[in-house]
Image: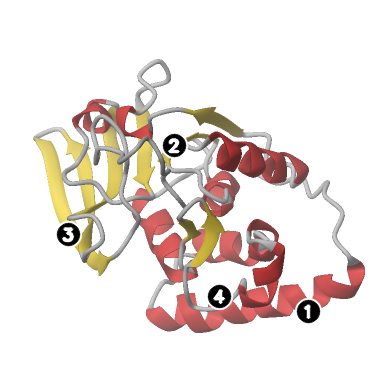
Amino acid sequence: MSDGTTTVDPRLEHEQTERRHAMVEEQIVGRGIRDGDVLSALRTVPRHLFVPPELVGQAYHDSALPIGRGQTISQPYMVALMTRLVVPTVRSRVLEVGTGSGYQTAVLAELAGQVFTVERVAELAAAAADILQRLGYHNVITVVGDGSLGLPDQAPFDGIMVTAAAPQAPPPLLDQLADGGRLVVPIGPAGRDQVLTVIERTPDGLREVESVPCRFVPLLGESGFQPEGGAGGLGA
């Protein structure tokens, strides 16, 4: 959770707070998400600090936004929905695949006991780690690497969130789910419509439930889509 150590321009703080609260009421509550902890996290995390400076005015719009390297910061509603589906608690150890801007990471860090986040693109990982540290999220560990393989040395995880689309649920991530743990991942072809899917490890085995249609950048890696020319990343 944040300890609020970063400095915010007081001339803008009130305006951005009002915009953030309006975003939650109109885009999140207005679409049926009522989880009080998730709503509190969305009201707390300053989304405008996770977007490029030229897009600050659009930070609370109902859309994904580009963050460079062909990646995006996800639509606020999708961030809220995926967070609710992972069901993080103060006792949870959560793995995020695709750090991107770090915004989704911060939302998870508001709720989970510990968050491990993996990003393929080193410059995105470094920028996200910097803002997360400045905001006081000391329960986050950022790793540069192939997120489709997870972090087996840190497994098992109570929740795994993949913020990029995979052709199927990556087997290494399924293997790293704790008993009762949930994997939330968009599944489908790259560049086309996908389905947000929840896979839970139950006493009777893995249970899969489809949530909503979505569209994410592709998950690049050994257990995702193969990179073309070695470029690209994940995105969140």
The residue positioned farthest toward the right in the image shown: 10
Give the CA separation, mark 3 to mark 1.
37 Å
Identity of the residue furthest to the front in this view: 229
Q: Residue at x 38, y 29 (%)?
A: 146
Q: Position of residue 199 (x, y in %)?
A: 20, 45
Q: CA distance from mark 4 to mark 3?
A: 24 Å
Callout 4: few (<14), some (14-19), or many (20+) C-alpha neighbours within 10 Å?
many
What amino acid type is highlighted by mark number 4?
Val
Q: Residues within 10 Å of mark 1 (few under 14, many from 20)?
A: few
Q: Quadrant of residue 170?
A: top left
53 left or right of 47 in image:
right
**Mark pair 4, 1: CA separation:** 15 Å
Find disc 2 in the rendering and name its residue: 94
Q: Secondary structure at mark 3?
A: strand
Q: Mark 2 and mark 3: span between their CA atoms?
A: 21 Å
Residue 52 point in image, percent of width and height: 66, 61
Residue 15 image label = 1
Q: Are marks 3 and 1 in contact (CB under 8 Å)?
A: no
Q: Earlier in the sequence, mark 4 or mark 3?
A: 4
Numbered circles on residues, count: 4
Residue at screen point 54% across, 48% down: 111
Residue under the image location 57 percent in, 51 percent down: 101
Q: Amino acid at mark 3?
A: Glu
What residue is shown with label 3?
Answer: 210
Q: Earlier in the sequence, mark 4 or mark 1?
A: 1
Disc 4 target residue: 24
130 to the left or right of 140: right
3D distance between C-alphas at marks 4 and 2: 23 Å
Tag 2, which secondary structure? strand
Precedes in sequence: disc 4 or disc 2: 4
